[in-house]
Image (cartoon, helix red, strand yellow):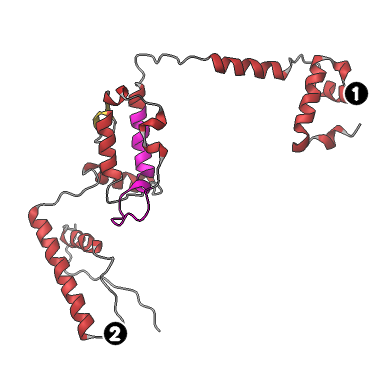
């Protein structure tokens, strides 16, 4: 017989387990060296065959019936609602409709669908409320609110941020269901600034042909951020704001 210590490797696990099962059934059925080795492992304790215990648990799982939840526990719809909110916060950006050209179909994220959690159509009409979020009502309505918030034309990916910053983004995203609330005057003012910037860019393109410059294209969203930063009052007086653009010498 090979030294038992050299046999203890992953490739021999099934063989040794089977040998130990035979030993537990009848110690005399294995070689004397293995019997002595297994005797040392047991150290005199009684042990039943592992296969019988494994089979008993397997049969128990097959015969298992769903336990009724106590009255104080949340219903299945309420539990799934909480899971859906978490899933949309983490994975919603994957299925966001931010590409207007629709070159390829959007990825399907199973965790964003109620079918993934085994809900029936009737359970979608149960009323749920998620603590710490604005989502409430029938589960199907909550699901629609989540879709509008996290899978619209804007994708929000913020789950990797530290807890305090993540909470800050989450509150502001969900308060408006993924959309900002702007008055007609604010929208007109923003449009005027965008038109003025576009006009300036065209003028520079014509006036300084071939000169290196930074284009406004792709940075239009920066206008809303700059407007908010300059407009929002500060605790201390601010007479001037300066925005610098880093450059690299040729």
Position above or below: 68 against 138: above
- The residue located at (85%, 32%) in the rendering is 4
Q: Which mark is residue 177?
A: none
Nearest to the observer: residue 14 or residue 181: 14
> Can you give x and y, in whole percent of width and height, for residue 31 in the image?
90, 23
> Can you give x and y, in whole percent of width and height, for residue 29 in the image?
87, 18
Callout 2: helix, strand or loop? loop
> Which region shows up in magenta?
80-106
Q: Is residue 120 left or right of residue 190?
A: right
Q: Could you tell me if the residues under marks 1 and 2 are in contact, i.e. CB atoms within 8 Å?
A: no
Q: Which mark is residue 211?
A: 2
Q: Callout 2 environment at 10 Å: few (<14), some (14 to 19), or many (20+)?
A: few
Q: Residue furthest left?
A: 185
- The residue located at (82%, 19%) in the rendering is 23
Q: Quadrant of residue 170?
A: top left
Q: Is residue 26 left or right of residue 167?
A: right
Mark before the other along the chain sequence, 1 or 2: 1
Judge whether residue 95 is colored magenta: yes
Position above or below: 4 against 153: above
Q: What's the CA distance linking mark 1 and mark 2?
A: 89 Å
Residue identified by numbered label 1: 31
Q: Quadrant of residue 192?
A: bottom left
Q: Quadrant of residue 243?
A: bottom left
Q: Is residue 113 left or right of residue 184?
A: right
Nearest to the observer: residue 192 or residue 73: 192
Counting labels gives 2
Quadrant containing the N terminus is top right
The answer to whether any part of residue 189 appears in the image is: yes
């Amino acid at each position: 017989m090979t030294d038992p210590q050299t046999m203890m490797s992953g490739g021999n696990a099934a063989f040794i387990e089977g040998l130990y099962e035979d030993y537990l059934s009848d110690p005399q059925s294995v070689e004397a060296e293995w019997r002595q080795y297994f005797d040392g492992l047991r150290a005199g304790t009684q042990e039943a065959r592992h296969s019988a215990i494994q089979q008993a648990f397997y049969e128990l799982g097959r015969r298992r019936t769903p336990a009724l939840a106590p009255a104080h526990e949340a219903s299945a719809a309420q539990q799934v609602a909480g899971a859906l909110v978490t899933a949309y916060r983490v994975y919603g950006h994957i299925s966001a409709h931010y590409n207007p050209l629709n070159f390829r179909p959007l990825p399907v994220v199973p965790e964003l669908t109620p079918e993934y959690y085994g809900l029936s159509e009737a359970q979608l009409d149960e009323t749920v409320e998620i603590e710490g979020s604005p989502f409430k009502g029938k589960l199907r309505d909550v699901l629609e609110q989540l879709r509008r918030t996290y899978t619209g034309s804007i994708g929000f990916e913020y789950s990797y941020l530290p807890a305090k910053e993540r909470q800050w983004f989450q509150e502001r995203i969900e308060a408006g269901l993924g959309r900002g609330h702007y008055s007609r005057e604010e929208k007109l003012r923003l449009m005027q600034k965008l038109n003025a910037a576009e006009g300036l860019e065209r003028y520079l393109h014509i006036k300084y042909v071939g000169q290196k410059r930074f284009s406004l294209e792709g940075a239009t969203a920066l206008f809303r951020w700059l407007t908010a930063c300059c407009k929002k009052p500060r605790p201390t007086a601010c007479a001037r704001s300066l925005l610098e653009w880093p450059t690299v010498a040729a």
